[in-house]
Amino acid sequence: LLGANAFASFCVTMALVFFAILIATKLSKLWRALLMMAIACMVLGVLWAYSRTSYVTILLGAAVIVLFWRGRMKLAIPVILALLIVPSLMPNSFTERFNDTHVEGKNVDASTDMRYVYWGVAWKDFTRHRLTGIGLATFADANPYHMGTHNFFIRGLAEEGVAGYRL
């Protein structure tokens, strides 16, 4: 029952954990092969989720792991080059997702535009129920669009109010 962004976040986290284990441990060839297959499955999950943030996060996360593992800062230039080259090697749907993103003026893409609508609904819910909120995990079902806020902070205020809000 995860949304695309939550699923992509899970895939990013698992891919980066598997990658760190792969490069930081001395495992048998079988376990290394299993970790590589698991990484491939998680990366495919990220690609298929079409989550722009997850695309960037997995690339930057892998770069950070490589750069900070055993002080390999000498790899900074190859890693930066890889970060510049890899996006151009991605499927067309990957690059279209970024190219279609506009956040200014009349060119706002539909996904971004609707987020402002969801945030407005959540803010109204919060202003009506400031202390207790509308109830934990109820926003997606309680609003007329049946969508989440795509923002944990605003959803937290709407669902939990000031009394339950936490960062």
Image (spheres, helix red, strand yellow):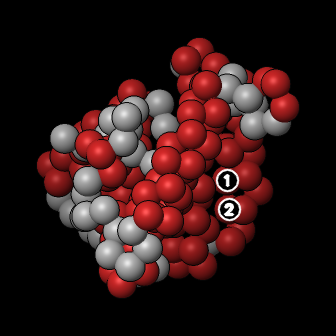
Label 1 close to label 2 by CB (< 8 Å)? yes
Q: Closest to the observer: 87 or 144?
A: 144
Q: Is residue 84 in view?
A: yes
Find residue 22 and report its image quarter.
bottom left
Taking the spot 37% from the left edge, 34% from the top edge, the residue there is: 144
> Within 10 Å of the Cα at label 1, are there few (<14), some (14-19), or many (20+) other Cα atoms?
some
Residue 34 in picture, x, y percent from top left: 19, 46
The residue sitting at the front extreme is: 128
- Relative height, residue 47 to residue 76 (above, below): above
User: In the displayed structure, does residue 26 sit left or right of residue 121?
Assistant: left
**Secondary structure beneath disc 2?**
helix
User: SS class of the residue under badge 1?
Assistant: helix
Label at residue 75: 2
Q: Neighbour class for label 2 at 10 Å: few (<14), some, many (≥20)?
A: few
In the displayed structure, 157 sits above or below 146; it is below
The vertical placement of 149 against 144, above or below, is below
Image coordinates of residue 89 in percent, x first then y, are: 62, 25
